[in-house]
C-alpha cells in the first residue's frame, strides 16, 4: 500500500478536548465575574474539579446554584442559556502540541494529503480548528454535522475521502474513538489506527471491527506507519 492521504479525527486525536473545555470554563468564569462580581478563580476551580470527576452534565446549573444568593434577582434558566451559548461560541485558547505540528508537517513533506473529519456542533469545531492553526497544516476539513453525517456515520469519512481525492486502498484513518472513528473506517474497507489519548482511552475495541493497530501516542503512529513511506 502506498499511503496518499491520512484522515484525522480532531478531538482527543490531534489535541486533548479537555483543553477546549477548560478554555470555555475560563470564559464563563470571567463573564460571571464581570457581570455579577462572582470570584472567577473560585468558579473556574469548581468547574474544572466537577468536570474531571463527573463530566459536563448540568455543570453550569450547579455553578449558579452555588452562587444563588448573589444571583437571586436574576432569571437562572435564561442565564444558563447565555452561559451555554458563551461556552459554545467562545474563541478557544488552545494550541497543538509541537510534536503534533511536526508530525503534520512531515506528513505533508512526504506529499501525503491530510484531511480532518470532525464531529460536533460546526461552530464549535470550526473555532477549535482555526484556534489550533490547522488551517495552515492540513488540506481540508469536513464538519460532519454540516452534512447530516454525525459519527459513527460512514458518510462523514466518505466525504473526507472525496476531499482527499484518493481511493480507499491509498488512505488511512486515525482516531481515538473505537465506535465513532474505527468502526466506520473498517466497514468502509479503510485501514484504521487508534490513538489512545483523551477521554475514551478505557473504551474497548469492537471485536468485529478492531483497529489495524493501536498506538499510545500520535508520534508512535507516525514513527511506525508513516515515517518510512516514500
Image (cartoon, grey):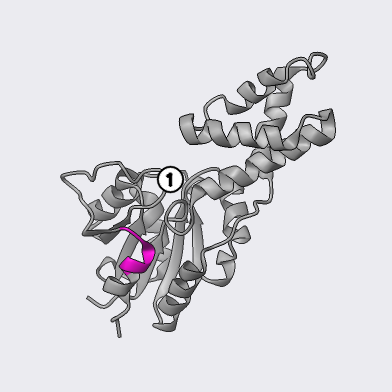
Q: Quadrant of the N terminus?
A: bottom left
Which residue: 37% across, 71% down? 5
Q: Position of residue 220 (x, y in %)?
A: 32, 67
Residue sticking out furthest to the left: 208
Q: Position of residue 228 (x, y in %)?
A: 28, 81
- Whether residue 138 can be seen here: no
- Whether residue 75 can be seen here: yes
* Disc 1 residue crowd, few under 14, some 14–19, many 20+, Cα 10 Å: some
Which residue: 62% across, 53% down? 127
Magenta span contains residue 21: no
Position of 213 relative to 183 (above/below): below
* Magenta span main SS: helix
Q: Position of residue 35 (x, y in %)?
A: 83, 32
- Whether residue 149 sits left or right of residue 25 in the image: it is left
Position of 65 relative to 224 (above/below): above
Which residue: 43% across, 73% down? 103
Q: Quadrant of the C terminus?
A: bottom left
In-front residue for pair 80/118:
80
The answer to which image quadrant residue 161 occupies is: bottom left
Position of 105 relative to 153 (above/below): below
- Whether residue 6 sits left or right of residue 125 in the image: it is left
Position of 145 relative to 211 (above/below): above
The stretch of residues the image draws in magenta is 216-221
Which residue: 42% across, 74% down? 113
Pointer 1 residue: 149
- Whether residue 159 sits left or right of residue 26 in the image: it is left
Magenta span contains residue 220: yes
Q: Position of residue 185 (x, y in %)?
A: 29, 54
Amino acid at each position: 500500500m502506498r499511503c496518499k492521504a491520512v484522515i484525522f479525527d480532531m478531538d482527543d486525536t490531534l489535541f486533548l478536548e479537555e483543553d477546549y473545555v477548560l478554555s470555555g470554563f475560563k470564559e464563563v468564569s470571567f463573564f460571571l465575574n464581570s457581570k455579577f462580581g462572582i470570584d472567577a478563580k473560585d468558579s473556574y476551580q469548581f468547574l474544572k474539579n466537577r468536570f474531571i470527576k463527573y463530566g459536563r452534565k448540568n455543570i453550569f446549573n450547579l455553578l449558579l446554584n452555588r452562587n444563588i444568593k448573589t444571583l437571586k434577582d436574576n432569571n437562572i434558566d435564561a442565564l444558563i442559556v447565555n452561559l451555554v451559548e458563551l461556552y459554545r461560541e467562545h474563541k478557544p485558547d488552545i494550541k497543538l502540541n509541537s510534536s503534533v505540528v511536526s508530525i503534520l508537517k512531515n506528513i505533508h513533506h512526504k506529499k501525503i494529503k491530510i484531511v480532518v473529519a470532525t464531529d460536533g456542533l460546526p461552530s464549535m469545531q470550526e473555532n477549535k480548528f482555526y484556534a489550533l492553526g490547522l488551517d495552515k497544516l492540513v488540506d481540508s476539513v469536513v464538519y460532519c454535522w454540516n452534512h447530516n453525517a454525525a459519527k459513527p456515520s460512514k458518510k462523514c469519512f466518505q466525504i473526507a475521502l472525496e476531499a482527499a481525492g484518493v481511493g480507499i486502498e491509498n488512505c488511512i484513518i486515525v482516531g481515538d474513538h473505537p465506535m465513532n472513528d474505527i468502526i466506520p473506517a473498517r466497514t468502509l474497507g479503510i485501514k484504521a489506527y487508534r490513538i489512545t489519548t483523551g477521554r475514551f482511552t478505557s473504551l474497548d475495541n469492537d471485536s468485529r471491527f478492531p483497529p489495524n493497530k493501536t498506538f499510545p501516542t500520535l508520534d508512535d503512529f507516525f514513527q511506525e506507519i508513516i515515517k518510512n513511506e516514500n
